[in-house]
Amino acid sequence: MNTFIKQNKQNILIILIVYVSASLFPAEQKAVIRAGVHISPPFIMSEADGDFFGMAIDIWESIAKKIEVETEYIPYRTVENLLNALQSRKIDLVLTNLTVTHDRAQRMRFSYPWYDAGQRIMINSGAKVSFWEQFLRSGQLSAYIGLFVLFIVISLALTFIRRRNNPVFTKNWLEGFTASLYDVIITSKSGRIQQNFGWIGYTLASIWMLFGMAVIAYITSTFTSNMAVSMGEQISSPMDLRGKETGVLFGSATAEYLQNAGISLIFFDNIDMAGEALAENTVKAVVADAPVVEYWVHQNPSLKLTPVGGLFQLEKYAFAGSFENSFMDQVSLEIIALHEQGFINDLKIKYFGY
């Protein structure tokens, strides 16, 4: 043993020096970024084992490698929970397709945008609404009942006047009423007075004809509107959503925009829940980020959901951190580099095919 030590004395000394150095000066560890994520295909998706993937993950992993940081992914159920976690310093980074807004920019620090998008409406193209069902939903039944009652009252009054002032008018109430009702309808439709009642009669008939023209226009417009709705042409823009329960994601910029437009909203945690509610006709439409809607429809063809109309409320996606996070400048520089290198464009082709 002594002979072995003597022969390898130099090697043993080198090993001891290395060991001591490693103990006194440990290798520098990479900083760990706590990244909050929210499931939003195809930007953020989750494997069965809990690993995350998607376009936003691909972009961030490339950036994390360049700036030499490790990532701890922390999932959140809603966008609002995600933003609250950033505000309370539970996470360092918001990692999803987060829309840049004026309000958010006052509360957090955005990176350089990595995706241009907009909002789009999704409807259930397989859901058929009957003409009668739409007639009842629109509340027009009460209006037609009111018109019918008005016609009855005027016809009864006209019958009473005729029976009193016209000796040759039938004394049978039912016959007299039906004759008067017929004359009222003819006057409304054609403007022709069936009998001379003097100047008072002509004046009243003229007023009634003007009213009748409005009635005919109303009937025509409501029937046309109900027919269009029953044929599935009722939604193509945000203004068409008024009076219809619309699904949106909780805490999204879309929700704020539609609330300001006076749209009745139902909130969902994610696009899967919103899409399933639309398929079950719990809501009449879902509004979300266009790429999210288009990707979800593509992945669920059996549900017969369809994006309609064009893009509106154009927006940009970016990552976000707190104002104290100095690494956000590095993140922005790397995103600019990824744009210039064509990396992000390649990801668009990978996930969307264009």
Image (cartoon, helix red, strand yellow):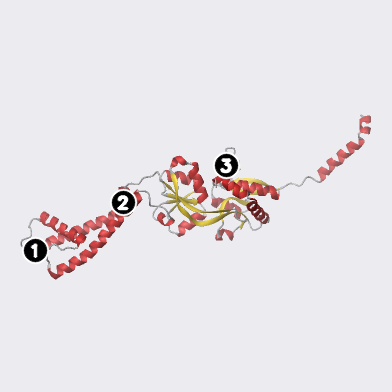
What's the residue type where badge 3 is placed? Ser
Query: Is 318 in front, or is 35?
Result: 318
Question: Measuring 52% from the left and 57% from the top, which residue is drawn there?
Answer: 314
Which quarter of the figure is the N terminus placed in? top right
Spatial CA distance of label 3 from label 1 is 84 Å
Farthest bottom residue in view: 199
Graded by Cα atoms within 10 Å as few (under 14), some (14 to 19) or many (20 or more), the crowding at tag 3 reads some
What's the residue type where badge 1 is placed? Arg
Spatial CA distance of label 2 from label 1 is 40 Å
Residue 44 visible, this orientation? no
Mark 3 or mark 2, earlier in chain: 3
Spatial CA distance of label 3 from label 2 is 44 Å
Residue 27 visible, this orientation? yes
- The kind of secondary structure element at disc 1 is helix
Q: Is residue 1 left or right of residue 110?
A: right
Give the image location of residue 81, x and y in percent. Answer: 55, 51
What's the residue type where badge 2 is placed? Phe
Residue on which the image places disc 1: 164
Residue on which the image places disc 3: 46
Give the image location of residue 70, x and y in percent. Answer: 68, 46
Give the image location of residue 249, x and y in percent. Answer: 50, 50
Mark 2 or mark 1, earlier in chain: 2
In the rendered structure, find residue 176 and report the number of the disc placed on it.
none
Q: Is residue 302 left or right of residue 18?
A: left
- The kind of secondary structure element at disc 3 is strand
Q: Quadrant of residue 143?
A: bottom left
